[in-house]
């Protein structure tokens, strides 16, 4: 019984630490951590794209359509990508 209680206490302490760390990050930076690939400037700078965007670009290239990089109507953001969206409409 003591070992179960120890595991629960350790889990609560670790969880509280992570909640505090995320709160402090948001307070000092003034915004939440940008973990979305499409909105993170460092990922954009490194040329990292989400899997859905890469797949869409590959499909468009295979069909001989414009890629997202050269199409002015495409914002290239993963948040705008829909899982059932047709690349022809992109």
Image (tube, grey):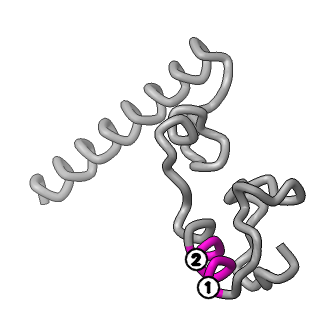
Identify which residue is drawn at 58% across, 77% down. Answer: 58
Answer with left or right where residue 23 lies relative to residue 12.
right
Position of residue 4 measured from the top left corner of the image (x, y, whole percent): 17, 58
Residue depth check, mark 2 versus mark 1: number of the one nearer the observer: 1
Numbered-mark total = 2
Instruction: Judge the density around disc 1: few (<14), some (14-19), many (≥20) Cα neighbours within 10 Å.
Output: few
Identify which residue is drawn at 62% across, 31% down. Answer: 32
The residue to which callout 1 is attached is 62
Which residue is nearer to you in this view: 82 or 5? 82
Is 61 included in the stretch rendered in magenta?
A: yes
The residue to which callout 2 is attached is 58
Q: Secondary structure at mark 1?
A: helix
Which residue is nearer to you in this view: 55 or 16? 55
What residue span does the magenta drawing correspond to?
A: 55-62
Which residue is nearer to you in this view: 55 or 24? 55
Query: Residue 27, relative to residue 85: is it above or below?
Result: above
Distance from Cα at disc 2 to Cα at disc 1: 6 Å
Based on the displayed image, in which of its 4 quarters is residue 21 positioned? top left
Quadrant where the N terminus lies?
bottom left
Position of residue 83 measured from the top left corner of the image (x, y, whole percent): 70, 79
> Principal SS element in the magenta part?
helix
Quadrant where the C terminus lies?
bottom right
Q: Are marks 2 and 1 in contact (CB under 8 Å)?
A: yes
């Amino acid at each position: 019984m003591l070992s179960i209680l120890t595991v629960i206490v350790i889990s609560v302490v670790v969880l509280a630490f992570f909640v505090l760390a995320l709160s402090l990050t948001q307070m000092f930076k003034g915004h939440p951590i940008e973990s979305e690939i499409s909105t993170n400037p460092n990922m954009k700078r490194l040329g990292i794209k989400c899997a859905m965007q890469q797949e869409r670009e590959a499909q468009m290239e295979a069909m001989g359509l414009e890629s997202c990089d050269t199409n002015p109507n495409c914002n290239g953001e993963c948040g705008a990508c829909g899982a059932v969206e047709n690349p022809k409409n992109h």
